Amino acid sequence: MSTGTLQAQVFLLPDLGEGLTEAEIVEWKVAVGDTVEVDHIVVEVETAKAAVEVPVPYAGTVLSLHAEAGTALAVGRPLITVGAASTGTPVDPGTADAGTTNSGTPADRYREEEQAGSGNVLIGYGTGHAPVSRRRRRGPTSPVAGAHDPRAGATTAGQVVRAACADAAAQAGRTDAEPGQGVRVADDDARPAAQAGGAGARLVISPLVRRLARDHGIDVARLAPGGADGIIRRLDVEQAIAGERQAVSATAGASVDVPGVERIPLRGIRRAVAHKLARSRAEIPDATTWVDVDATALLAAKDVLQAAHPEQRIGLLALLTRICVAGLRRFPALNSSVDTARAEIVRFSHVNVGFAAQTERGLVVPVVRDAHTLTTTQLATELARLTALARAGALPPEALTGGTFTLNNYGVFGVDGSTPIINHPEAALLGVGRIIDKPWVVDGALTVRKVTQLSLSFDHRVCDGGVAGGFLRYVADCVERPTTLLADL
């Protein structure tokens, strides 16, 4: 790089909200050497929620793209390096790639936000306020910060841990403490820990790294730090996870490539669906109840409404949503969630109805917010809008979150019923099968009617069968006699 003309600015993959920890690079919109302006769209990524176009917060020349299309990139990792005109000291792009830019750069700001549990989201459109929790100031005199550069004669991370252990031992009346004796060192948000495990202490600074290790059952005390500073990093944990998976695969013989067997990586929406459904089955003690109903009158009501409002298509899904909203008002226990951390049932005053929509990218569940405030016509309009966005792959992440109840019309696939899996962390889901002609007894006489099956899966922690059965019976009555809804208007 020419001296004194360009300063490298590294843009890290931003927090895309809703707890998303990674995104897959779908398509780069720029190439090395291109000139970009602030808020220029540089890449399209696919998260577990939706496809997102990411703008860059810097202007200048593209110096480096840090991941190829098809690569899954963790939030906070370098995404793109831009060289901007500057009168200051130039920065080596190789150093920028490693995320070790000068203090105040995006890499350092991300580390500070990571340690403080920042809620910052896409490109600095963040939380709009400074973090309220206390955290360690990182400056030239910070022992841990200095440990990254041994040539500066700064205190090493190991010395920091030994000193902290000695302090803790002194407070406990002991003078022979060693780092390997399991003394825990903490300072508010950073909370590094010296733990037992071999020749030296294990220092874990990042809360994300600790959570990653905990979620995968990795004991950081048994890990060897990849760097000379003694700090356990995300890469160390990821390598340990990969090693355990390989060991399990080798034991089970699953890692052997078998002719005619195709291996498909779990990515994007498929990975998100797998994670959510597995979590639902693991955490929610669900039960399912169902009933066959005569939908002849509901179909007739739909035809009447469509004739009265030819400009607005009011479909069956809109009517079922209206019925579910009325049912949840009568049985609010099902419009809730369980906070396991606080051992509480959280009951919502609002009704946000999610509905399953099959798209080319897979199954997504857009959410109609505040459905209890909308008319049937407004519900139909919102359902149509969200369905169109889902099929175009243009749903924003916020349109896929926040549901309090889910409606799944799997009858469009030609099936009668199922035992639906609850959309975690909600407490209930109503499934609707296909509507077909069946023999039915009406006023003592056998006739042919339009019949469907309704299946309700519910979280048995929030209610018992009486409440779930009452809700399902109310919905069934409204399907068979839609005028029943008039009583609640």
Image (cartoon, rainbow, N blue to C red):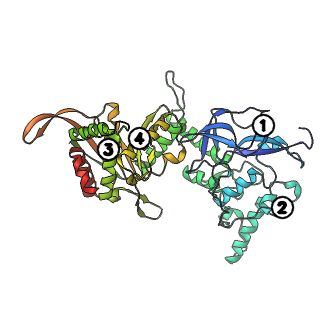
Q: Position of residue 99 (x, y in %)?
A: 76, 47
| Cα–Cα span, label 1 and label 3 | 52 Å
Q: Position of residue 358 (x, y in %)?
A: 43, 35
Q: Nearer the viewer, mark 4 or mark 3?
A: 3
Q: Residue at x 33, y 48 (%)?
A: 322
Q: Is residue 389 above or below residue 330?
A: above
Q: Nearer the viewer, mark 2 or mark 1?
A: 1
* The N terminus, quarter of image: top right
The secondary structure type at the circle numbered 3 is: helix
Q: Give the residue at mark 4.
A: 356
Q: Amino acid at mark 4?
A: Ala
Q: Say which of 203 and 222 sits in front.
A: 203
Instruction: Please give left or right for residue 467 compared with residue 146 in the image.
Output: left
Q: Residue at x 69, y 72 (%)?
A: 168
Q: Say which of 142 and 127 sits in front.
A: 127
Q: Give the residue at mark 3.
A: 319
Q: Nearer the viewer, mark 1 or mark 3?
A: 3
Q: Is residue 175 above or below residue 160?
A: below
Q: Position of residue 443 (x, y in %)?
A: 8, 42
